[in-house]
Amino acid sequence: FRGFFQTNSKAFTAKTSCVRRRYREFVWLRRQLQRNAGLVPVPELPGKSAFFLGSADEFIERRRLGLQRFLER
C-alpha cells in the first residue's frame, strides 16, 4: 500500500509525504486496535489471497482500495 499524506503540522518539514506499508503491518494494526477497542467493532481487512479472477494489477488495486477503506473507518 502506498499513500500520500498532507499536513500543516510544524512537526514535519515536508508538507506532503509518501508512505509505504506492507499488508502484514495492517494485520498488526488491526490486532492492536482489537485489543484496545473494547466493544467497538474493528473493520475487516481485505483478503490477502493470491487466488483471484482478473489480473494481478486488478487484485492489487482492489486490495489497495480495501486498505484505504479500512484506514478511513
Image (cartoon, rainbow, N blue to C red):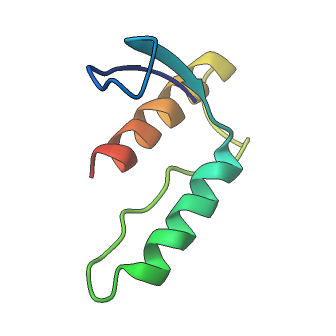
Compared with residue 41, is residue 70 higher up or lower down, i.e. above or below?
above
Q: Quadrant of the N terminus?
A: top right
Q: Nearer the viewer, residue 14 or 38?
A: 14
Q: Position of residue 49 (x, y in %)?
A: 69, 48
Q: Position of residue 54 (x, y in %)?
A: 60, 24
Q: Position of residue 45 (x, y in %)?
A: 49, 55
Q: Position of residue 21 (x, y in %)?
A: 63, 35
Specify the farthest residue to the front: 10
Question: How many discs mark residues in the rendered view?
Answer: 0
Specify the farthest residue to the bottom: 39
Compared with residue 53, is residue 44 higher up or lower down, i.e. above or below?
below
Q: Nearer the viewer, residue 9 or 59?
A: 9
Q: Quadrant of residue 38?
A: bottom left
Compared with residue 12, is residue 28 higher up or lower down, i.e. above or below?
below
Residue under the point 41% across and 32% down: 65
Residue under the point 26% across and 20% down: 8
Q: Nearer the viewer, residue 38 or 51?
A: 38
* Residue 48 visible in the picture: no
Residue under the point 46% across and 14% down: 13
* Residue 20 visible in the picture: yes
Compared with residue 44, is residue 60 higher up or lower down, i.e. above or below?
above
Residue under the point 64% across and 38% down: 52
